[in-house]
Image: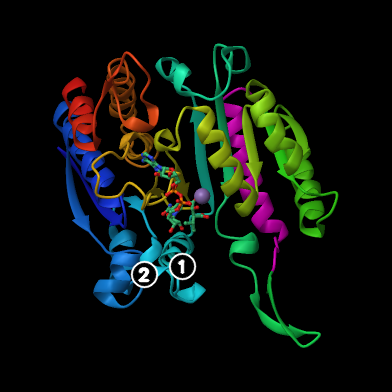
Amino acid sequence: MKHYRIVLLKGDGIGPEIVAQAAFVLKKAGERFGFGVEFDEALLGGSAIDAAGSPIPRETVDKCRAADSTLLGAVGGPKWDGLPGDQRPEAGLLGIRRALGLYANLRPSMIFPQLRAASPLKDSVIGNRLNVMIVRELTGGIYFGERGHRTVDGADAAYDTEMYSVPEIERIARVGFETARKRGGKLCSVDKANVLESSRLWRKTVARVGKEEYPDVELSNLYVDNCSMQLVRDPKQFDVIVTSNMFGDILSDEASMISGSIGMLPSASLGAGKAGLYEPVHGSAPDIAGTGTANPLATILSAAMMLRNSLGQPQAARAVEDAVSAALETARTPDIWTPGTKKVGCVEMGEIVRSLL
Ligand code: NAD
Ligand code: IPM
Ligand code: MN
């Protein structure tokens, strides 16, 4: 029997609650589909600062490197907001993405038919099928560029730098084109090329990669401001979107809401190796942490992405997604609750998914 070693980075806020439910689901998927899952925990973010004095202890990176895959909850919270940037919980998250070379973040936004009433968009806007994949560059751009303070006209000033090299753009563009090829054959590259030099290089490079390597994929370009408007005006027009680290961060929160709640949106962070890191798109939700009401489905769906992309268990992945869909027929956490459905908490939602698996 195949055995997988999975590292759990529970993190902060609702992180431990949602990861626990996703881990149970992975275990159950193994029982049903004939593979074993062994979990190991490691510290990341605020809890790592408190326990080990660093948002990303060395041991965490070593454990993730040795594992078959990693599942992350979320990091951050008001307790650590006053720390300098490079010591914050979020620096741990950026650090692990960088250390593992996870340059491509796949954020699929789709709407389960049962959740239509939970989406703020009208039925006529959503249509029959909504399925947008955002491919976000994850280890470059303004998140990792030079930053600091200097004095301007006698006053303190701070700066961050957006920079992309041609190889960085080429590799994320290829992920975008490959993803589009396996889906609807359409790729929209999103930038701010009317203003930013880095975006002009981005657009030129994506166009060349498309022309040379993916003539079968239909490539279009949008400025990010227009894209954010188009996502709520007519989200059906999109198949795959490829964009920079910061634009992808912002657009994916927007796209998540179309699906009813950010508590539904999973993601896969992938690099050259097979292992990857799987993380919900949302954060540690300090406002509801400890109340038992967090929606675990984004994390459970992230575990499904892990089964498919890193563990080579597509049937198990499908079964988990089907169990989530079946659970939504009756049970809802408060973020996606609509009249006529049963309101449940995080643990109960996890149990229902498991019982349907
Ligand atoms: P957030 O995503 O944590 O929360 C935004 C809103 O969505 C809140 O009202 C929250 O209650 C709700 N929400 C989020 N996830 C939910 C879930 N699973 N179920 C139900 N409701 C959910 O964003 P924020 O409040 O801007 O950030 C809080 C902290 O999380 C910050 O420290 C931020 O840096 C961090 N953060 C971490 C990650 C990550 O670790 N991947 C991602 C985003 C934000
Ligand atoms: C996300 C988060 C992170 C990001 C933060 C917490 C560093 O918002 O994963 O979307 O901006 O990448
Ligand atoms: Mn984000």
Image quarter in which the C terminus is found: top left
Q: Give the tally of numbered discs.
A: 2
Q: Is residue 182 magenta?
A: yes
Q: Residue at x 22, y 33 (%)?
A: 350
The answer to whether residue 60 is visible is: no
Location of residue 79 (image quadrant): bottom left
Secondary structure under tag 2 reads loop
Image coordinates for residue 70, horizontal then vertical, percent: 32, 51
Q: CA distance from mark 1 to mark 2?
A: 8 Å
**CA neighbours of label 2 inside 10 A, class few (<14), some (14 to 19), many (20+):** many
Q: Residue at x 39, y 50 (%)?
A: 277
Instruction: Please state if 157 lies on the left or on the right of 57 as rendered.
Output: right
Numbered badge on residue 56: 2
User: Is 200 or 276 nearer to us in this picture?
Assistant: 200
Instruction: Please state if 112 lies on the left or on the right of 178 as rendered.
Output: left
Q: Residue at x 51, y 39 (%)?
A: 107
Residue at the spot of label 1: 91
Q: Is residue 173 above or below residue 186?
A: below
Q: Residue at x 64, y 36 (%)?
A: 241
Image quarter in which the N terminus is found: top left
Magenta segment, principal secondary structure? Answer: helix
Q: Is residue 354 magenta?
A: no
Q: Is residue 100 above or below residue 207?
A: below
Q: Magenta stretch?
A: 161-185
